[in-house]
């Protein structure tokens, strides 16, 4: 780690190296305040002290990223120098990455950013991403699903992504993005568009985007990568922030009936213009009015007229052609002439020319994982959390629908859910199905082959009344006659402490000599 250095006052707008500052508490250091303002992005180093990462593979243990102590980023102040000498490069690489916000009291990259091209040919004017290759605007690299891609993650070489999966298996990886420069006029570095092609095999098999392939934006909570927010396939854009790494989570879900073989495709990442920048290039009122007049003239000339002679029709068509040619030489269409009609629209051809392409391969093995998970992993959801989150009243139709939605959603990830209601002394009423055992929905829940285990509601745990005991007895009598009874379990207390230890001893004494079926 770099030695702790005092922070001297600087003028607003200075690009300064990150450094911790003394805290009011003895022996503690805190991050620089958010008053530091950055206006330009110095260049990023071409090499890093850590060894190059191996090709991404979800089956290789060495695919895990190096420890955070192996990663280092240059401070912004060091990157201002254009001295390419080895000493300058070495000095740049010795500066440590600041801590993540929310962890050890760190900040979020205040006082340092990477970006800018070494010997940049882009100049200081606003960058048009339609005319610059996206590789010149941002770093793109792949990371395994086991890695926590922090906002300070250092760029790595872009490599081919190669995954292996069985049928009925889900595999994921991440694409990390970090801006080199800013191409937006607003406070963000700029938006990027992420498009994935279908994965196809030589035999005609296909994994379709939106069905078997999903993209999610990894959103940090207090600086720690946490939430996976779905990316709308109709508008697959996310915003990048200056000096921060952003990750996209890519999931490949192989259906049970998928044909085995090698599937290949690619993910295209393209820097695009912001909505505000696009609106800024809209036609001024004078040009719009001129276009309106010219178009109206064309319509007047070409309107159908009765008893028009051939000579008159030829004259009208010639006049229309002249008017249209005048429209094409208006200033609004100047870029179209310069680019052979392409203009600066981000159409498919233009985006293909400037996009960064991540090659993706998936080998589907010739066997299928069982529908019922071999490991009965269970996950509990508090019913009161659902009620508060969705403003639902217990026992209403909306309440049942919400529980049903959570139940089916978790089964997709091979997790057997249960719902719970809390009592005192860590008592818990755990149940997998909110309906009683004699309800038609109950058999649908318990018989689902994706469910590895289910909790039987032990009603006396909260209220040890005769009604609760009779309810439990009726549930067990119905369930133990079903084929799925082997999946059943009771969950009575959530954590072990003195009270539950005493209850365990009582239960053990009373159960001696009992027979279990």
Image (tube, rainbow, N blue to C red):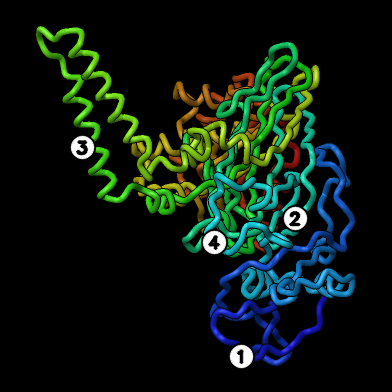
Q: Quadrant of residue 363?
A: top right
* Label 3 to label 1: alpha-carbon separation: 60 Å
- Of circles 4 and 2, the one toward us is 4
Q: Secondary structure at mark 4?
A: loop
Instruction: Look at the picture and state if 491 lies above or below 222.
Output: above
The dot on residue 155 is 2
State which tag comes first along the sequence, 4 or 2: 4
State which tag comes first along the sequence, 2 or 3: 2
**Residue placed most toward the observer, 219 or 417:** 219
Mark 1: give few (<14), some (14-19) or many (20+) Cα within 10 Å: few
Q: Secondary structure at mark 3?
A: helix
Residue pointed to by mark 1: 9
Q: Residue 298 appears at what percent x and percent y?
A: 23, 27
Q: Residue 496 appears at what percent x and percent y?
A: 68, 57
* Label 3 to label 4: alpha-carbon separation: 35 Å
Q: Residue 153 appears at what percent x and percent y?
A: 72, 59
In which quadrant will I find the N terminus? bottom right
Residue pointed to by mark 4: 125
Q: Secondary structure at mark 1?
A: loop
Q: Secondary structure at mark 2?
A: loop
Asked whether residue 227 is in view, the answer is yes
Residue pointed to by mark 3: 293
Q: Residue furthest front?
A: 311
State which tag comes first along the sequence, 1 or 2: 1
Instruction: Look at the picture and state if 233 lies above or below 246.
Output: above
Mark 4: give few (<14), some (14-19) or many (20+) Cα within 10 Å: few
């Amino acid at each position: 780690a770099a030695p702790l250095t005092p922070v001297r006052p600087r003028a607003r707008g200075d690009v300064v190296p990150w450094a911790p500052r003394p805290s009011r508490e003895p022996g503690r250091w805190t991050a620089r305040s958010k008053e530091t303002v950055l206006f330009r992005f110095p260049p990023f180093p071409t090499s890093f002290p850590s060894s190059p990462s191996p090709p991404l593979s979800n089956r290789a243990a060495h695919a895990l990223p190096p420890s955070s102590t192996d990663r280092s980023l240059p401070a912004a102040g060091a990157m201002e120098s254009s001295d390419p000498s080895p000493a300058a490069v070495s000095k740049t690489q010795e500066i440590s990455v600041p801590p993540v916000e929310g962890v050890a009291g760190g900040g979020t990259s205040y006082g340092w950013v990477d970006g800018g091209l070494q010997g940049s040919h882009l100049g200081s004017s606003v960058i048009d991403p339609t005319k610059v290759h996206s590789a010149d605007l941002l770093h793109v690299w792949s990371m395994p699903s086991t890695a926590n891609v922090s906002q300070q993650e250092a760029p790595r070489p872009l490599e081919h992504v190669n995954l292996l999966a069985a049928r009925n298996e889900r595999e994921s990886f991440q694409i990390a993005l970090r801006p080199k420069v800013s191409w937006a006029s607003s406070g963000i570095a700029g938006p990027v568009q992420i498009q994935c092609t279908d994965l196809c095999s030589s035999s005609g098999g296909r994994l379709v985007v939106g069905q078997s392939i999903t993209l999610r934006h990894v959103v940090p909570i207090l600086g720690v990568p946490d939430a996976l927010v779905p990316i709308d396939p109709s508008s697959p854009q996310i915003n990048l922030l200056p000096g921060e790494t952003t990750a996209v989570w890519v999931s490949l879900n192989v259906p049970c009936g998928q044909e085995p073989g090698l599937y290949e495709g690619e993910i295209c990442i393209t820097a695009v213009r912001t909505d505000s920048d696009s609106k800024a290039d809209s036609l001024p009122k004078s040009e719009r009015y001129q276009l309106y007049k010219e178009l109206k003239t064309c319509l007047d000339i070409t309107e159908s007229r009765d008893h028009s002679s051939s000579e008159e029709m030829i004259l009208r068509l010639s006049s229309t052609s002249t008017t249209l040619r005048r429209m094409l030489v208006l200033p609004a269409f100047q870029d179209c002439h310069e680019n052979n009609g392409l203009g600066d629209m981000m159409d498919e051809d233009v985006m293909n020319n400037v996009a960064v392409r991540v090659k993706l391969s998936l080998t589907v093995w010739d066997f299928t994982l069982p529908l019922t998970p071999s490991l009965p992993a269970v996950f509990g959801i508090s019913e009161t959390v659902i009620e508060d989150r969705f403003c639902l009243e217990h026992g209403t139709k909306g309440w049942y629908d919400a529980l049903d939605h959570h139940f089916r959603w978790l089964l997709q990830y091979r997790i057997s859910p249960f719902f719970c209601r809390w009592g005192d002394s860590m008592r818990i009423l755990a149940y997998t199905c909110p309906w009683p055992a004699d309800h038609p929905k109950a058999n649908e829940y318990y018989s689902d082959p994706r469910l590895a285990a289910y909790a039987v509601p032990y009603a006396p745990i909260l209220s040890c009344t005769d009604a609760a005991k009779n309810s439990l007895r009726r549930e067990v009598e119905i369930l133990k006659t079903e084929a799925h009874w082997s999946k059943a379990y009771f969950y009575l207390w959530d954590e072990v402490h003195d009270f539950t230890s005493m209850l365990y001893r009582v239960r053990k004494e009373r159960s001696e000599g009992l027979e279990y079926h």
